[in-house]
Amino acid sequence: MIRINLTSGFLVTKVAIPHLIKNKGSIVTISSVAGLRTAPSLPAYCASKAGLIALTQSIAVDYAEQNIRANVVCPGWVRTEMADEEMNSLTKETGETLEQAYQRVTKLIPARRPSKPEEIANAVSWLISDEASYVTGAVFPIDGGSIAVDAGTVEFL
């Protein structure tokens, strides 16, 4: 988990930085809301995603004067094949449909749904654009509001 989610990001950016310096490039890493908040039984995943956030912010600080911007996007649930596989595991345990499983995992999220891949892609596209030329070191949760919720109070809604 650490190798895939953190070490690979470190190695790719290490190789890319000299090229990005020449071209005033921009880096956007994809972490997860699990890098901002922990999740049960996922210590390696959460640690690897938190490490990716710190790595990205370190790059932003170290290379800002060389015109490299580095930002990180932290998606929540995104409706992808990989997420569908996770939901299928849940459906086997609960007997629910795929749609019901997504409803279950997003019921405490203000948006009450997973994001679409293009919603994440649009944010990344903006971050690498000239419109975001002064944005560096930022962490963007794209999570339907999930990290804004105090889980201990949702029963009062």
Image (cartoon, helix red, strand yellow):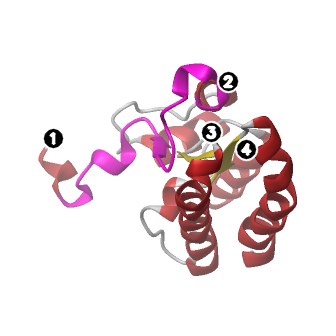
Pointer 3 residue? 78
Query: Who comes first in sequence, dot 3 or dot 2?
Result: 3
Q: Please tell me which of labels 4 and 1 falls first in the chain.
A: 4
Q: Say above or below: 44 vs 131.
A: below
Mark 3 crowd level (few <14, some 14–19, many ≥20, 10 Å Cα)? some
In the picture, measured across the screen, residue 37 lies left or right of residue 13, that is: left
Name the amino acid type tagged 4. Asp
Q: Earlier in the sequence, mark 3 or mark 4?
A: 3
Check disc 1 and report the residue beneath it.
157
- Residue 62 position (above or below residue 142): below
Q: CA distance from mark 3 to mark 4?
A: 9 Å
Q: Given the current orientation, which residue lies at the most extreme left position?
A: 156
* Real-space Cα separation, disc 3 to disc 1, in angstroms: 25 Å
Q: Which residues are the magenta region?
A: 127-152
Residues at marks 4 and 1, CA–CA distance in whole angstroms: 28 Å
Residue highlighted by disc 2 = 118
For image coordinates 39% across by 41% down, the residue present is 107
